[in-house]
Image: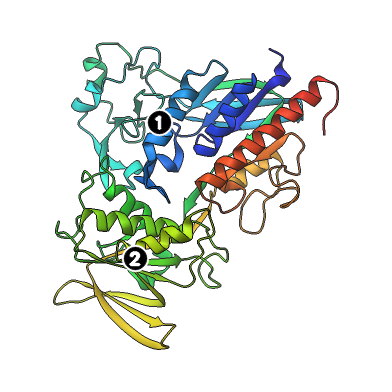
Amino acid sequence: MKANESVLVIGGGIAGMQASLDLANRGSKVYLVEKTPSIGGRMAQLDKTFPTMDCSICILAPKMIECLRHPNITLLTYSELQSVKGSAGNFRVEVLKKPRFIDENKCTGCGECAQYCPTEVPNEFDMNLGIRKAIYIPFPQAVPLKYTIDEENCIKCRLCQKICKAGAVDFDQKPETVNLKVGAIIVATGFELFDAGRIREYGYGKYRDVLTSLEFERLLSASGPIGGHLLRLSDGCVPRRIAFIQCVGSRSLKGGVQFCSSSCCVYATKEAILVREHHPECEVYIFYNELKVFGKGFQDFVKRAQNEWGVKYIRALPGEVVEDPKTHSLIIWYEDTKENMTKNTEIDLVVLCPALVPRIANKELAGILGLELDKYGFFKPRDVLYTPVDTNVPGIFICGYCQGPKDIPESVAQASGAAARAAEVIALSSSGGVR
């Protein structure tokens, strides 16, 4: 296969995987680069998807396996882009493959090494609510299902090396530079969460029963740190009243970002329904500024939450969350913008829905690729209406949340668009012209 018929995809989340599969099924060679030990991205952390309430990993896992087994896709996990030279149709790329200290060809993923590892550290996949060992896989459905040794926390006892019957543990591994030639590049680096601790009025980091939405998602998940049971972290009791606070650090002129993250109203609705499924007696409130639910079936989803599940929506601006010194319950003070009154209510568990923001690493990646960022840190399209996946650099395309706020279905659709544009560049370069 000619070098210019290959494509580099940066980011192994749902958008990066969809773009890779589309191109691979067209016959192109794809190099899928993911900086963590497994593909899957943020969607792998979710329990359910909206508005269908389907199991997230049940949808995602088949695509992950297909990426692993597809003859035209090479997975470069635990790897990061280092440099890019050349132009559309003939990019020369350097990728740094970090050492797992595990021979991937020998590791069977049996997990015996982790059982004997003496070191426990917070599990970032569970938003640090659970623990993992210093030798670990990120989550049970990880792809590839190969262990990684966390060099920073490993105490070098080498017990895992003695235990491993396959002889897969290799402490002598070094970083490896992989040189590639590709005709096009697709960037799909996703998002990260706004630091809810910056909005100090809500008590995140101060009160154990104030969580972010993604932390709450992991608590609700059967694969999460408490097996999907709905319990308060402070005392292990089932909460009787739960409140979701929207737009934490979002649409804010002070201390936050000025854009709407697009999906927060709907995922809060999804999590509220999950609460009612777990415990129908639990009261659930969603404090919102405006309901932005403009996707297919989303408005009906909200109506079902209200009418069938009894979720209460309160148009209000919460000003502060404090703890009652006697009962240790949380008190939300808010302005009811319909009645123009200041009110308060007692809550057992508060879930903050923070802004979803571009990754900080986008700035460094933009420097390597020569791409422009907008004022928020998203990769800037050449034209948001006419060429939403094209960038200022011919042959480099963007898709998913790194291009701008969107939900999973939009990200998947845009990934297919980016794949189609990359295929077009490959076809034109093969015929002697690129546009």
Secondary element at image label 1: helix
Question: Mark 2: few, some, or many residues within 10 Å (few <14, many ≥20)?
Answer: few
- Image x and y of residue 434, in percent: 82, 30
Q: Which residue is mark 2?
A: 307
From mark 2 to mark 1, how far is it between C-alphas?
A: 33 Å
Q: Amino acid at mark 2?
A: Asn
Question: Mark 1: few, some, or many residues within 10 Å (few <14, many ≥20)?
Answer: some
- Image x and y of residue 96, in percent: 55, 27
Q: Quadrant of residue 294?
A: bottom right
Colouring rule applied to residues:
rainbow
Decide if residue 195 is in sight here. Answer: no
Secondary element at image label 2: helix
Decide if residue 261 is in sight here. Answer: yes
Residue at the spot 14% in from the left edge and 74% down from the top edge: 327
Residue at the spot 41% in from the left edge and 55% down from the top edge: 267
- The quarter in which the C terminus is drawn is top right
Residue at the spot 55% in from the left edge and 40% down from the top edge: 412
Q: Quadrant of residue 185?
A: top right
Q: Is residue 164 above or below residue 9?
A: above
Tell which circle, 2 or 1, labels the residue nearer the N-terminal end.
Answer: 1
Q: Is residue 286 above or below residue 161?
A: below
- Image x and y of residue 324, in percent: 20, 76
Q: Is residue 430 above or below residue 19?
A: above
Q: Amino acid at mark 1?
A: Ala
Out of 136 and 423, give the one closest to the viewer: 423
Q: Which residue is mark 1?
A: 61
Q: Is residue 189 left or right of residue 341?
A: right
